[in-house]
Amino acid sequence: MVVARTQKVSRAERVGPPKIETKKSNALRRSKSRQATTTAKERKLAKYIGQTIKLRRQILGVSAAVLAKRVRVSANYIYQIESGRKTPTTFVLFEIANALGVKIVGQ
C-alpha cells in the first residue's frame, strides 16, 4: 500500500488485523510453560550428576577449563552442570564421561 505523506492512515491500516487467539495457540503456550518447570527429583538428579562430575574431575586433578576444552563446551557450562543449575544433554554427558575416563552403564 502506497500512501502519500499528506494522507492520514488509520491505526488499523498501520498495525494490521487484530490477533485472534485460538485454542491451538493457548495449548502451545501451556505446553511450553510445563516444559520449563522441573520437579524436585530432576533437580536432585542434576545436583547429584554435577557433584559426581566435580568429584571425579578433582580426583584426576583436571580443571573445569581443561575439561571444557576436551568436551568442546564452555567452562561456565561445566560450572553450571557441577552446581546443578544446568542438566547436560545426553551427548554432553557421554563426552564428559569419556573425558573423565568413566563408563556409563544402563540398567
Image: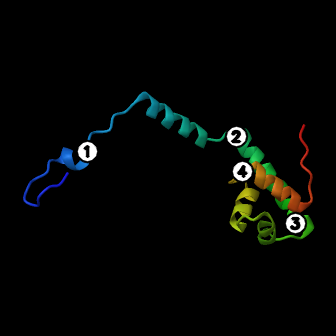
Disc 2 residue type (three-letter):
Ala
Disc 4 residue type (three-letter):
Thr
Q: CA distance from mark 1 to mark 3?
A: 59 Å
- Judging depth in this view, the residue of 104 and 62 nearest the camera is 104
Could you tell me which residue is drawn at 80 percent across and 51 percent down?
49
Q: CA distance from mark 3 to mark 4?
A: 20 Å
Give neighbour class at mark 3: few <14, some 14-19, many 20+ (Cα, 10 Å).
Answer: few
Q: CA distance from mark 1 to mark 4?
A: 42 Å
Which-is-in-front pick, marks 2 and 1? Answer: 1
Res 40 label: 2
Could you tell me which residue is drawn at 89 percent across and 40 percent down?
106
- Does residue 95 sit above or below 18 in this rendering? below
Query: Toward which corner of the image does residue 98 lie, by quadrant?
Result: bottom right
Image position, residue 85 (x, y; %): 68, 54
Name the element at disc 4: loop
Image position, residue 11 (x, y; %): 18, 47
Q: Are marks 4 and 2 in contact (CB under 8 Å)?
A: no
Q: CA distance from mark 2 to mark 1?
A: 45 Å
Q: CA distance from mark 2 to mark 3?
A: 27 Å
Which-is-in-front pick, marks 4 and 2? Answer: 4
Res 58 label: 3
Give neighbour class at mark 1: few <14, some 14-19, many 20+ (Cα, 10 Å).
Answer: few
- The residue beneath circle 1 is 16
- The residue beneath circle 4 is 87
Which-is-in-front pick, marks 3 and 4? Answer: 4
Tell me which numbered mark, 2 or 3, is placed earlier along the sequence.
2
